[in-house]
Image (cartoon, rainbow, N blue to C red):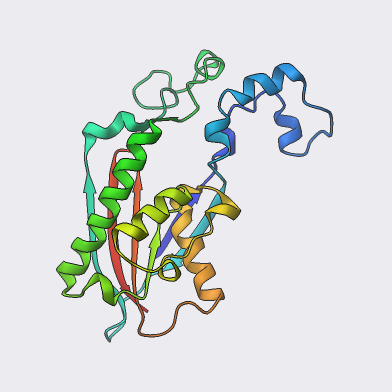
Amino acid sequence: MLLVGAELHTGFMPWHLGWDTVIGESNREVTDAEKAENTLSRDRTVLFGDGAGAVVIEARPGRAGLLKTLLYTDGTGADVLTMKGASFKTRPFVTPAQIAAGDTIPVMQGKEVFRSAVTLMPQAVREVCASAGVTVESLDLVLVHQANLRIIEGVQKALCLPAEKVPHNIERYGNTTAATLPILYHECLENGLVKPGMLIAFTALGSGMHWGASLYRA
């Protein structure tokens, strides 16, 4: 089975004014008016990035592989991280009026996202470890959804783990959402951080609200 996580966020960001410079079709100077409008959503444009990752999953004999996965959802938190336009709530899904109004730009309640993330992801890691009969202390690595560095550090501290067990690359790529964990895992493999027999937990949280954790033996 091929599992793919891929995101293209730049198209949803408000660079419809000056977009030609963003994608390299022009080297003109963006006007002051364009800069002013785009700056209105700077708090989101600086967070999100484009990315993709994939992994092949297959059944093999032995003790290695995915040991346990737990997933949760709570629809009452849907408005914490959402997008007003380009959704099934509206007909038609996308209109020029929605784009002009900025309704295709993600809306985020930052404080609530942070509170949920640093509470629910550590909780999911503890629960997936307990369900597999292992301790959090026995984890060799915890790969956290790369939403922002404060959240990653919050999860690390909540789990009482040293920083070297919770690697991150958010400072290089931004939040690529569904792609963050496969990209981070690939980098850990490339950098020699993953060795046979290691116990690794993956955890993520996103819009919906949805969250969960998986336990993996390398």
**Left or right: 11, with 185 as reference point:** right
Residue at 63% across, 25% down: 38
- In the rendered image, residue 21, in percent from the top left (x then y), is placed at 76, 33
The correct choice, above or below, for 88 with respect to 172 in the image is above
Q: How many circles with numbers are drawn on the protein?
A: 0
Residue name at image x 47 percent, y 48 percent: 148
Please provide percent x and percent y for residue 139. Answer: 31, 74
Q: Give the side of residue 97 with respect to residue 121, left or right.
A: right
- Residue 100, compared with residue 165, is above or below; it is above
Q: Report if residue 12 is visible in the image.
A: no
* Residue 62 against residue 42 in the figure, above or below: below
Q: Position of residue 149 (x, y in %)?
A: 47, 51
Q: Is residue 193 left or right of residue 34?
A: left
Q: Say which quadrant the C terminus sits in.
A: bottom left
Q: Quadrant of residue 197?
A: bottom left
Q: Residue at x 47, y 67 (%)?
A: 185
Quadrant of the rendering where the N terminus is positioned:
bottom left
Quick check: can you spot residue 138? yes
Q: Residue furthest top?
A: 97
Question: Height in image: 52 above or below 138?
Answer: above
Q: Nearer the viewer, residue 105 or 61?
A: 105
